[in-house]
Image: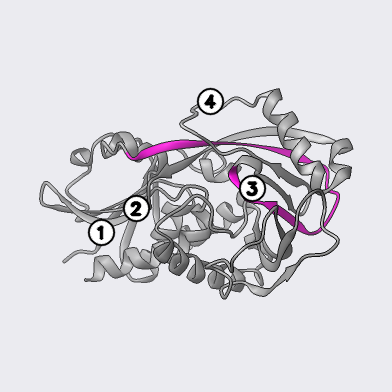
Amino acid sequence: MEKKVLVIGGGVIGLSSAICLLEDGWDVTIHSAEFSPNTTSDVAAALWYPFLSAPVEKTDAWGSRTYDILKLLTVDEKAGIEMVQTYEYFRSKQEDPSWMSTVDKFERITEDLPSDYVECFSFMTQVIEMPIYLNWLMDRFKFLGGKLEKQIVTSFSDVSDDFSIIVNCTGLSSGELCHDSEVYPVRGQIIRIKPLIGEMHLDQQVPTLAYIVPRSNDMIIGGVAQEGNWNTEATIEDRNFIIDKASKIIPGIKDAEIIEDIVGLRPGRTEVRLEKELISGRTVIHNYGHGGSGVTLSWGCAEEIVEIINE
């Protein structure tokens, strides 16, 4: 059997899946409507943290594997990944998170917390500068012999018979491509500001969602998680809402110099769809619906794609 695979989608999920398949000896082509710097992945904050994704038992396993791989990649300066001291705040007592054993140096803090927070998880996790990281993934893909073509796929039946297997990594577009009514946008808005601090601070509860993410030349502050909202334009209401929430954690953010506002639509779904389907006699493997955890689950899901194909 000729090992030719078409991956549809050029974001972090598509590129990670394609790289794992190339490393396994497959001939891989990516078709995508957009490539970096014009993908949803480019505007992600981004950090390793399971957010708005299910089912937990699977996302924990995929996330754990991805954490380990991202940690290994921190030694490559070109990858744009750093281990960062992180603080996650809560307004009520918390049980141990399901991912506690995955991260480094996890501990609880209950004293000297900002605002009205009563508990904090302290741990080490990765901050991923997506424009840099996506370039690294693209270079790796090309180095391994992968081929790229800018092309919109509107139906699996339109894909050439040259490809014996299709891997669908189209994110939010899978709703239309797969006629999947469980797919929905989760609108996010973030603000790039001049850098202030070197640690990451999080409040991951959706109603009070706030994150402060340090990067090499700027900081990202966010955010919102608005289900069903397709608006890709930044709003002043959301900007003010974000600054107000973030400044409760780091007061200096109120006076920080703003570089730009950015909006992205997370590919929400009731749960991640990672499964094989036969369509007109051809194998299609779906890998979409990662919510706010695309980077966090990327390598774990990609490795499972290879396992499914090799079955």
- Please say if 123 is above or below 55: below
Find numbered disc 1 in the image and state the secondary structure of the residue it sits on: strand
Find numbered disc 3 in the image and state the secondary structure of the residue it sits on: loop
Front residue (pair 126, 52): 52
Front residue (pair 121, 159): 121
For disc 2, the marked residue is 29
Q: Residue furthest left?
A: 281
The nearer-to-camera label among 4 and 2 is 4
In primary-sequence order, the first of circles 1 and 3 is 1
Look at 85% across and 37% down and name the residue there.
254
Task: Give x and y (percent) for residue 290.
Answer: 44, 51
Q: Are marks 4 and 3 in contact (CB under 8 Å)?
A: no
For disc 4, the marked residue is 231
In primary-sequence order, the first of circles 2 and 3 is 2
- Please say if 97 is above or below 233: below
The nearer-to-camera label among 1 and 4 is 4
For disc 1, the marked residue is 4
Q: Residue furthest front?
A: 93
